[in-house]
Image (tube, coloured by chain):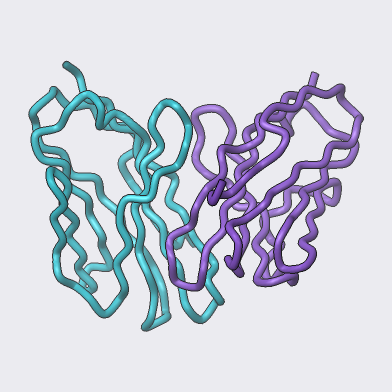
Chain colours: A cyan, B purple
Amino acid sequence: AQKVTQAQTEISVVEKEDVTLDCVYETRDTTYYLFWYKQPPSGELVFLIRRNSFDEQNEISGRYSWNFQKSTSSFNFTITASQVVDSAVYFCALSEVYTGNQFYFGTGTSLTVIP
Amino acid sequence: GAGVSQSPSNKVTEKGKDVELRCDPISGHTALYWYRQSLGQGLEFLIYFQGNSAPDKSGLPSDRFSAERTGGSVSTLTIQRTQQEDSAVYLCASSLIGQPQHFGDGTRLSIL
């Protein structure tokens, strides 16, 4: 079974629209970490955020915000007022402490922001 | 530099040849990961090291693939008798426990 599911394969939005990227995870561990990475067309993987399983506070960083809900096993990522530079593939990932730091990546969501 | 270093950055080889890809993780990072990414695809997990041992080799596609890590540092991924379907970008990442993975720039492997 998929540990991390990103159901949206591709999303296109017009510049300045808000967009939410969904991430649903599955784990039996009580202690785990969730991550989002960005992979722009240039190819490098860029770390965006890490949350631990005990901290459900939403986080905002500029135009980016993350909504962590343990009740629904979701860790969604919202970009407000999207820009062309946001065009990239975004990966959600899970790291379970009991497996000794194994990472599980989702299949990614390709976001295209149209000017 | 202080980041994850992979070499070579590009490798072109003929079908049937063996190739060796190298990864230098960030100093002190105990965990090291290998992934494969084909064009336009997601990250395919290959193998993961904790120290010098590999708790999870489940992602290796076939017995032509092997990897080792020595001294808790450098890792090499070896592909024997390469096939055209092995063409991809091979990414290495390292991390501390529970911390974000830091990725190298990858090795772009092309099998002719």
Residue, x 36% and y 58% (percent of image)? A35
The spot of residue B64 in percent (x, y) is 85, 46
Indicate the position of residue B56 as horizontal and vertical percent values: 67, 67
Looking at the image, is B45 positioned above or below residue B18?
A: below
Rendered residue at 17%/60% (across/down): A67
- State how many labels appear: 0
B96 relative position to B13: left or right: left
In the image, residue A29 above or below residue B60? below
The image quadrant that residue A14 belongs to is: top left
Name the image quarter holding residue B107.
top right
Residue A64 pos. (x, y %)? 17, 47
In this view, A107 is above or below A86 = below
* Residue positioned most to the front: B1
* The C terminus of chain B lies in quadrant: top right
Q: Residue at x 62, y 55 (%)?
A: B25
The residue lying at 41 percent from left, 57 percent from top is: A93
* Residue nearer the viewer, B30 or B48: B30
Left or right of A25, for residue A86: left
Give coordinates of residue A113: x percent, y percent.
22, 25
Q: Is residue A50 left or right of residue A18?
A: right
